[in-house]
Amino acid sequence: MITSEDLRHLQFFADLDPAGREELALEAADVCLNAGDWLIQEGDTGAFFVLLEGLLEVSKETAGTEHVITTYQPGEAFGEVPLLLGSGAVASIRARQDSRVMRVEAPAFHALMTRSDAIASRVLRNMTRRVGDLQRLAVETPQAVTLLIGSRAEPGCSQLRDFLARNQVLFRWLDPEEPALAALIPPEVAAGPQPAVILPGGGVLIRPTLRQLAVQVGLQVHPERSEYDVIILGGGPAGLAAAVYGASEGLCTLLVEKHAPGGQAGTSSRIENYLGFPTGLSGDDLSARALRQARRFGAEVVTTREAVAVIPSAQPGQGCHVITLDGGERLQARTVIVSTGVEWRPLPLARAGELSGRGVWYGAARTEASATRGKDVYLIGGGNSAGQAAMYFSGYAERVTLLIRGPSLEASMSQYLIDQLGGKANVRVCLNCEVAALHGETHLTGLTVRHHRSDPQHLKSSVDEHIATDALFVFIGADARTEWLPEQLSRDELGYVLTGSDVSKDSWPLSRDPLLLETSVPGIFAAGDVRHNSVKRVASGVGEGSMTVALVHHYLGLQQQA
């Protein structure tokens, strides 16, 4: 317990009157740390601290590497930067040895600042010094930047750009068709085949596969074990939540993701209705936070891998399931969580496949935003993903046109997005229309948009409009891709996985009923968009992912009782 006497012996509070010390002691928490314990981690909610005993180490992650900034000795006060800036913690603090720390929450800290000018002055001097330390770290820490060389028109280049961006790999793209950027490309690379990747250490990859690139930039592509308590298939919001909760609760956890953690939500330019983030956050930011959290708890996350087969346990409710990854690797799992989500539905038009990545893009494709600068951009779709993308591209493009098949946005888009779109002068919403044709040989050059009309006598007609554009972003819905799952695992007519009460008694092999998110195969669960009748929202995916871990524990408990 912090007492007024403790504060009296601290030089930092020498100018605080006895009543103030008594008041502060009543507000303060007495935090005891063992060597190696974290006091606070980067991004956490801030507080004001004074080290009473022990030794603390301050570190910050920069370019994927943790750098020690300084250490704190007994008597030092810290933590004022995030409180005064209104941000999360800007660095992480860990005990080097057993330590005792006084913690003061924000309201008591601000009251202390107003009570004593001398303390306020010390706090501001400390803040200035610490901000200088952070600036110096930013300047002195070399940034390991990967260079990607390739033409905008090359689909392989766009795929590599998207992969690097979504996996939080720091890179710079040099387009040889842009004279100012072409001058920065080494001659030996400029003259060779592309796309090419120049690694920070100087190595060069020519037309690498995503897995080859993943290995070279330090991503994990192979599991470390052959058996796990839970294997999570798919790294969208549901899969990431399951990984965080599974690992934090002591389960040996593996997450398998074929492209980049975050799923479709990871491509969202702005999610503004997610609980706890009043100013919104990008899908990339949410995914990166969740991924860092899962790894901190000990979850393994492998990328550029996918499951190609699941062999259920021969004894329902007992034993392990077998997961086969692409490449033939076989893993055993006491439980499995299927959270593979959905994949964008392809545009059902001639040449759509040939022009994919050459002007026709599925999802937000945020790496293409700079390419839309000063252009007319078209988006197909009336859901939230399309609305978020329209808002994002409006900051680059001359004009953004949202093409909607229906008569209004209200049935498919959140009202806050409708209001925001209405306030953008360079965003146009075109209702009752559809894209009837795509034009272009090696790259998209234009569209035929069919406008549907009804006259006063309710007679319908259509008018075709030919539009020149080289950028079309498609958000026409998504489908579950679950044909690779075993036949014992029941799905609806559209391929979505049945769980809980939706599982028929004829397909359920045990005397007990299936658990809430359990599939027709005991010990295999489904969460997120891949599940039948799921709510297609990030928050619900996170909720289902975390819920499955509680059900996994329940299932494992039943196994032990059997």
Image: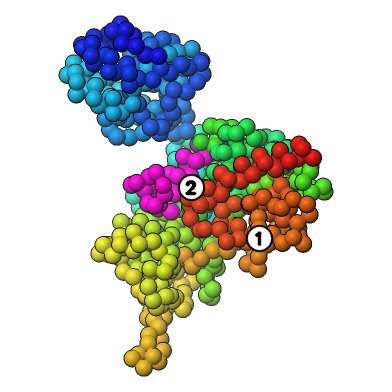
Residue at 33% from the left image edge and 13% from the top image edge:
76
Extreme residue toward the top, this view: 9
Single out the residue that lies furthest toward the right. 314
Eyeballing the image, is 157 above or below 144? below
- The kind of residue tagged 1 is Asp
| Label of residue 502 in the image | 1
> Along the line of sight, which residue is nearer the eye, 158 or 154?
158
Q: Is residue 277 magenta?
A: yes
Answer whether residue 110 is visible to the viewer in this image. Answer: yes
Which secondary structure, mark 2?
A: helix
- Residue drawn where x is 43% and y is 60% of the image: 385
Q: Residues within 10 Å of mark 1 (few under 14, many from 20)?
A: some
Q: Position of residue 407 (x, y in %)?
A: 39, 76
Q: Main SS of the magenta segment?
A: loop
Q: Nearer the viewer, residue 236 or 183?
A: 236
Residue 159 position, x and y percent, is 51, 54
Q: Where the N terminus falls, by quadrant? A: top left
Q: Is residue 192 above or below residue 101?
A: below
> Alpha carbon of mark 1 to alpha carbon of mark 2: how far?
35 Å
Residue that appears at 48% across and 50% down = 539
Magenta part of the chain: 268-292
Q: Is residue 132 left or right of residue 493?
A: left
Kindly identify which residue carries mark 2: 166
